[in-house]
């Protein structure tokens, strides 16, 4: 019997949801495909049909988390009254979203280790840096930023925030540390103001 496109999408979504739980709880190395397919009521063959292997499944989970964080950043930024406030809100939303307990292991620990640095960076560029770059480009066009390279600015700010997230994730007082990071980010951004 042929499965409909909707049924296939539901199967994939269910596998990603279950795998995300297992990767979050046990980490990539200890997450067992046997348990994931058993919980999804599928065979390993069905999993391999959709994702080829465990790494392919992890990539799908990683991409889902990246999309969610990106959507959170976009929503928070959009609630700002002007371009500067949108940028600040977006930066804060990124820090908050990336360090949430259900995202940390996938984004910060296993993501770079499992996917490799090149794939990790491609995903970061696709979901986080592209929004940051668009906002900076808009602000520069509005005359709010100095006429410096948008590419360089995007990479420097993204790198600073990624490093801040790693620092924040290891702290018990995350809310306070996010505030400390935001003070520094605001000062960095002020240096770019026209």
Image (spheres, helix red, strand yellow):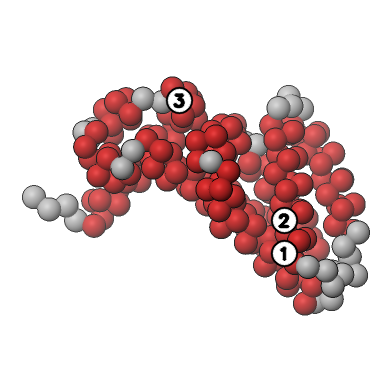
Element class at badge 1: helix
Query: Is any part of residue 89 visible from this angle?
Result: no
From the top left corner, tell me how far across and down residue 18 is, in percent.
38, 34
Q: In the drawing, what numbered circle is on residue 29?
A: 3
Residue 36, placed above or below residue 94? above
In-image side of 122 versus 53 (left or right) = right
Count all numbered tags in the image, as a single digit: 3
Q: Which residue is mark 2?
A: 155
Element class at badge 2: helix
Residue shown at the point (49%, 27%) measured from the top left: 27
Asked if disc 1 and disc 2 are in contact, CB closer than 8 Å, the reply is yes
From the top left corner, tell me how far across and down residue 67 is, in percent.
52, 52
Element class at badge 3: helix
Return the residue nearer the eye: 19 or 49. 49
Residue shown at the point (73%, 40%) measured from the top left: 163
From the top left corner, tell me how far across and down residue 44 is, in percent.
24, 33
Label 2 packing within 10 angstroms: few (<14), some (14-19), many (20+): some
Residue shown at the point (72%, 64%) measured from the top left: 151
* Quadrant housing the C terminus: bottom right
Residue shown at the point (81%, 41%) measured from the top left: 181
In-image side of 20 versus 81 (left or right) = left
In-image side of 54 versus 73 (left or right) = left
Real-space Cα separation, disc 3 to disc 2, in angstroms: 30 Å
Q: Which residue is mark 1?
A: 151
- Res. 175 image quadrant: top right
Real-space Cα separation, disc 1 to disc 2, in angstroms: 6 Å
- Res. 126 image quadrant: bottom right
Query: Is any part of residue 140 visible from this angle?
Result: yes
Real-space Cα separation, disc 3 to disc 1, in angstroms: 35 Å
From the top left corner, tell me how far across and down residue 161 is, in percent.
73, 46
């Amino acid at each position: 019997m042929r499965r409909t496109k909707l049924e296939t999408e539901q199967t994939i979504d269910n596998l990603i949801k279950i795998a995300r739980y297992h990767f979050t709880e046990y980490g990539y190395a200890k997450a067992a495909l046997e348990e994931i397919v058993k919980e999804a009521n599928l065979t390993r063959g069905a999993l391999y049909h959709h994702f080829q292997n465990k790494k392919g499944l992890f990539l799908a989970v990683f991409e889902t988390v990246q999309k969610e964080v990106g959507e959170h950043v976009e929503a928070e930024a959009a609630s700002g009254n002007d371009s500067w406030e949108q940028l600040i809100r977006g930066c804060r939303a990124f820090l908050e979203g990336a360090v949430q307990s259900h995202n940390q292991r996938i984004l910060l620990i296993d993501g770079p280790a499992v996917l490799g640095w090149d794939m990790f960076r491609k995903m970061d560029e696709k979901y986080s840096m592209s929004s940051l770059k668009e906002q900076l480009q808009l602000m520069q066009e509005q005359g709010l930023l100095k006429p410096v390279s948008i590419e360089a600015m995007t990479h420097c700010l993204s790198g600073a925030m990624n490093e801040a997230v790693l620092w924040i994730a290891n702290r018990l007082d995350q809310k306070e540390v996010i505030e400390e990071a935001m003070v520094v980010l605001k000062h960095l951004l002020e240096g770019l103001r026209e």
